[in-house]
Image: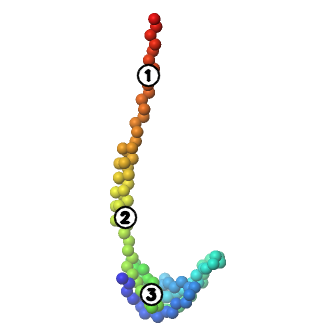
Amino acid sequence: MAEVVAKAGVKKEGGFLYFIDKNGNVARAKMQRGGGKTKGKSKTEVVAKVGVKKESGYLYFLDKNGNVARAKMVRGGKKKAKKKAAKKVVKKKVAKKAAKKPAKKKVAKKKKKR
């Protein structure tokens, strides 16, 4: 499913988030743990200069071996939209059948005089 784009051989350390930055290099940032909040972004440091050229439609990540890999992004907007539209139509038809007609008012009869 994923294909290796560049061999970097990065050794991962615990407590860091590894990612591919804008320039295509492998970078890492310290993860926030235990509710310790700091203002602003955490400092990122470049671990390996790879210089991968990114293409749109792919997700770039660091695999188990520490190499830069990519996988095609799956997007299913059209199928989901059709299913939602079909469900809305069914719900509207059911709602129309359930609507009740207003009750008619009874007219009082006049009494006859003797």
Q: Amino acid at mark 3?
A: Asp
Q: Which residue is mark 3?
A: 63
The image position of residue 95, as x and y in percent, is: 39, 47
Give residue 19's position: percent from left, percent from top. 50, 84
Helix, strand or loop at mark 2: helix
Residue at image point 44% right, 87% down: 63
Name the kind of residue labelled 2 in the image. Lys
Tag 1 secondary structure: loop
Residue nearest the viewer, comparing 13 with 55: 13
- Say if 101 sits above or below 94 in the image: above
Residue at numbered disc 2: 80
Q: Nearer the viewer, residue 111 or 70?
A: 111
- Which is more toward the observer, 76 or 58? 76
Q: Nearer the viewer, mark 1 or mark 3?
A: 1
The Cα–Cα distance between marks 3 and 2, rounded to whole angstroms, is 30 Å
| Residue underneath mark 1 | 107
Can residue 38 be seen here? no
| Residue 87 in sight here | yes
Q: In the rendered structure, which disc, 1 or 2, sits on the residue that comes first in sequence?
A: 2
Task: Specify the quadrant that holds the N terminus.
Answer: bottom left
Q: Residue at x 65, y 78 (%)?
A: 36
| Of the image marks 3 and 2, the number of the one nearer the N terminus | 3
Considering only vertical position in the picture, is 3 above or below 80? below
